[in-house]
Image (spheres, rainbow, N blue to C red):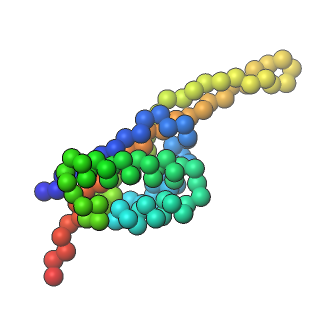
Amino acid sequence: MSASFTAITRNARISPTKVRLSAGLIRGKRVEDAINILHFELRRGSLMLKKTLESAIANAMNQGGIDPMDLVVSEVRIDKGLVIKRFRPAPKGRAASRQKKCSHITVSVAKAAAKSA
């Protein structure tokens, strides 16, 4: 039974829909592959996801003493965070509401299962 190490970024100022596009690319991948994918991905959500992944790797190294090359991205979850409500001027003296969405980014890494010959 392998331990799982998690890192969470709360209320990241980006819409969950935008981050989920990058999260789908790294699910189930080896950690070094996932970091390379996120490094060359040109979306802003990839940068936030990469920072959270690096934090989960650091947790595994410090708390579990596990070599980063043995880790696999076991879970990536992007949840809806708080919604900041703002108003902008609209025609005829009215106000139009704007919703600025935030995300909770959760990344878990676990030791890869040993390959049987």
Q: Where is residue 56 in the image (x, y as percent from the top left)?
A: 33, 49
Position of the C terminus by quadrant: bottom left
- In the image, what residue occupies the spot 74% across and 25% down? 88
Q: Is residue 41 left or right of residue 114?
A: right
Q: In this view, does 58 lie to the left or right of 84?
A: left
State the residue in front, 75 or 50: 50
Q: Does residue 113 lie above or below 51 as drawn?
A: below
Is residue 38 visible in the rendered image? The answer is yes
Q: In this view, does 24 lie to the left or right of 88?
A: left
Q: Does residue 12 lie above or below 19 as drawn?
A: above
Considering every residue shown, the one lying at the far left of the view is 1
Q: Where is residue 66 in the image (x, y as percent from the top left)?
A: 21, 57
- In the image, what residue occupies the spot 37% across and 41% down? 8
- In the image, what residue occupies the spot 61% across and 24% down? 85
Q: Splitting the image into 4 quarters, where does residue 35 fall?
A: bottom left
- In the image, what residue occupies the spot 28% across and 47% down? 59
State the residue in front, 56 or 78: 56
Q: Is residue 34 left or right of residue 85?
A: left
Q: Splitting the image into 4 quarters, where does residue 29 fall?
A: bottom left
Q: Position of residue 98 (x, y in %)?
A: 66, 29
Position of the N terminus by quadrant: bottom left
State the residue in front, 117 or 80: 117
Considering every residue shown, the one lying at the far bottom of the view is 117
Is residue 108 visible in the rendered image? The answer is no
Considering every residue shown, the one lying at the far right of the view is 92
Q: How many labels does the image show?
A: 0
Q: Position of residue 102 (x, y in %)?
A: 52, 35
